[in-house]
Structures are given as structure tokens and as C-alpha cells.
Amino acid sequence: MNEQGCETFISDCHVRAAVELVSHTWDPVIVSALRLGPTRRSVLLDRIAGVSDKVLTESLRRLTARGLVARAPHEAGRDAAVYELTPLGASFAEGPLAHLAEWAAENQAALSPAS
């Protein structure tokens, strides 16, 4: 096993598991938005430009199943819920995701397609 926790071409390596957390376009955006604190789904829908209701719902379900986001009932009503980062989600948001965002910002020009 190498430093990254993988043997050559093993499908269940640790790097692959980590990359899967950012492989869905909206998942890292939603995790970043939840860094601001517990939030209702409708607020997330307004806060995140370009995400559809269906995609937001799918992403929240996926992130909840992965243990990164927790869903709790909201005091406003039986159908209302609040979403927030779990300790695992917060460590992901403040660690690797923050570093990835910083790297992307520093290298934005190099990453942009040539015009």
C-alpha cells in the first residue's frame, strides 16, 4: 500500500472514496453553503444559484446517507426540516474541501479553457 492508501488500480482505495464526495456537481456547493449553519431546504434553494429543486433534494439525501449532513425537524411544521453539517461534514468542509477551493482559486486562470 502506498502513501495514499491505495495499491495500484484498486477500485476501493481511500483516494477514490474521498473523490466521490466531490464527484457530484452540487454536493460540494451544498456542503459549503451549510458551513453558514443549520438551514432549511428552501433557503438553500434560494442561496445556491442554478440548482434545481430536484437536484438539491437528491444531493441532500446523498449527503445525509454519507453522514456528512444531518436532517432534523424544524419547529415550523411537520413537513419542514433543517439541514446541518455533521462533525464529519464539518471536518470535510473545513479541511479537504476548503483546500480544494483555495487551490482552484489560486489556479483559476490555468484551469480555464483557452479562449
Image: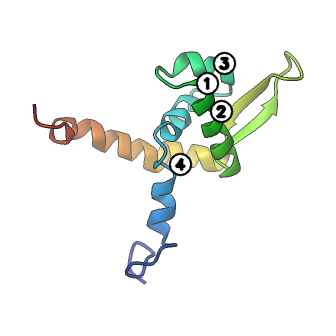
Quadrant of the snapshot with the N terminus: bottom left
Q: CA distance from mark 3 to mark 1?
A: 9 Å
The answer to the question of whether label 3 and label 4 lie on touching residues, with beta carbons closer than 8 A, is no
Q: In the figure, is residue 90 to the left or right of 15?
A: right
Return the disc, 1 or 4, that comes first in the chain's sequence.
1
Q: Is residue 71 above or below residue 6?
A: above
- Residue 11 screen position, x and y as percent: 48, 73
Circle 1 — which element? Answer: helix
Q: Disc number at residue 1?
A: none
Circle 3 — which element? Answer: helix
Residue placed furthest toward the right: 78
Circle 2 — which element? Answer: helix
Q: CA distance from mark 2 to mark 3?
A: 10 Å
The answer to the question of whether label 2 and label 1 lie on touching residues, with beta carbons closer than 8 A, is yes
Give the number of the mark in front: 3 or 1.
1
Question: Which residue, given by chain and number where applicable, does mark 2 sit on?
Answer: 57
Question: Which residue, given by chain and number where applicable, does mark 1 sit on?
Answer: 53
Q: Is residue 9 above or below residue 62?
A: below
Q: Amino acid at mark 1?
A: Asp
Rendered image quadrant of residue 69: top right
Question: Which residue, given by chain and number where applicable, does mark 4 sit on?
Answer: 92
Question: Which residue, given by chain and number where applicable, does mark 3 sit on?
Answer: 42
Q: CA distance from mark 3 to mark 4?
A: 23 Å
Residue at 61% x, 24% y is: 53
